[in-house]
Amino acid sequence: VNAMKSSWAGALGQPQFMPTSFLKHAVDFDGDGRPDIWNSTPDVLASIANYLVHYGWLRGRGWGVEVTVPANVSCALEGPDQGKKVSDWVAMGIRRADNKAFQASELKAEGLLLMPAGRSGPAFIVTPNFYVIKQYNNSDLYGLFIGHAADRIAKGDATFAGSWGPVGDLHRSDIAALQRALEAKGYDVGSADGLPGFKTRRSIGVWQAKNGKPATCFPDAGLVAQLK
């Protein structure tokens, strides 16, 4: 019991499981009779895998790939509830950023557009596995960087092809004010919490398109001023 140390918030071991997750998902993979997510690498990795499988990880698929999105494809098509066959995204002009073709099996499967910085950053076609990763931490950037780190370990992939624009120029209170203004106009931003999640990003894009403006799908100072 003394070895079962946690963070100040109660997260346990190397996977940082909360106690309920430890009870549900921790695995004794090294066969010593107890799941040890503090010191046993086999137990740590097997427990994380068990967690991901529980939330629906699809064997044989990765998390996603970076893509290029033509200007005529709306950034408001983003989101886990707007999936299409990967072949449909390709038919719209979306291509892998590394210029490789999608595998035939992937073309038949569901892909989801992810543009975490709208038109101000890299874009991705992700698989449902990306949203399984987000069960671990409900952040697009967390899921993105976990997937990217795994690619770099497995394949030696380098940095993203797309560059990140000025995405950190606003205070959280400014974004929350923008979200409240969009809500007042009937848009679903998810929550007026100052965090530009996919519902906020695509609501911005829809509002911009309806008002004759280029859809950027990301908050900026000019947009905040227009919507206040």
Image: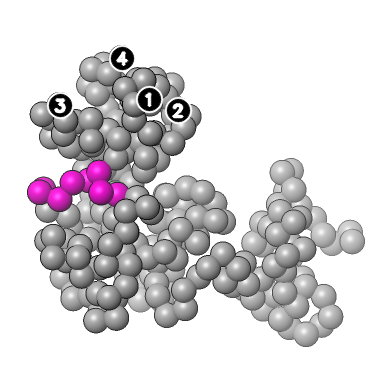
User: Dot 2: what SS?
Assistant: loop
The residue that disc 1 covers is 183
Examine the structure image and report whether residue 35 is included in the region drawn in magenta.
no
Q: Is residue 159 left or right of residue 72?
A: right
Separation of disc 1 and disc 4 at Cα?
12 Å
Separation of disc 2 and disc 1 at Cα?
8 Å
Residue 95 seen from this side: no
Q: Earlier in the sequence, mark 1 or mark 4?
A: 1
Boundaries of the magenta span: 71-78
User: Dot 3: what SS?
Assistant: loop
The amino acid type found where label 1 is placed reads: Glu
The amino acid type found where label 3 is placed reads: Asn
The amino acid type found where label 4 is placed reads: Lys
Dot 4 alpha-carbon crowd within 10 angstroms: few under 14, some 14 to 19, many 20 or more: few
Among the 4 quarters of the image, the one containing residue 155: bottom left
Separation of disc 2 and disc 3 at Cα?
22 Å
Q: Is residue 128 above or below residue 100?
A: above
The reply to whether callout 2 and callout 3 are in contact (CB within 8 Å) is no
The reply to whether callout 1 and callout 4 are in contact (CB within 8 Å) is no
Q: Residue 61's spot in the image, x, y percent?
A: 40, 75
Q: Is residue 19 left or right of residue 1?
A: left
User: Dot 4: what SS?
Assistant: loop
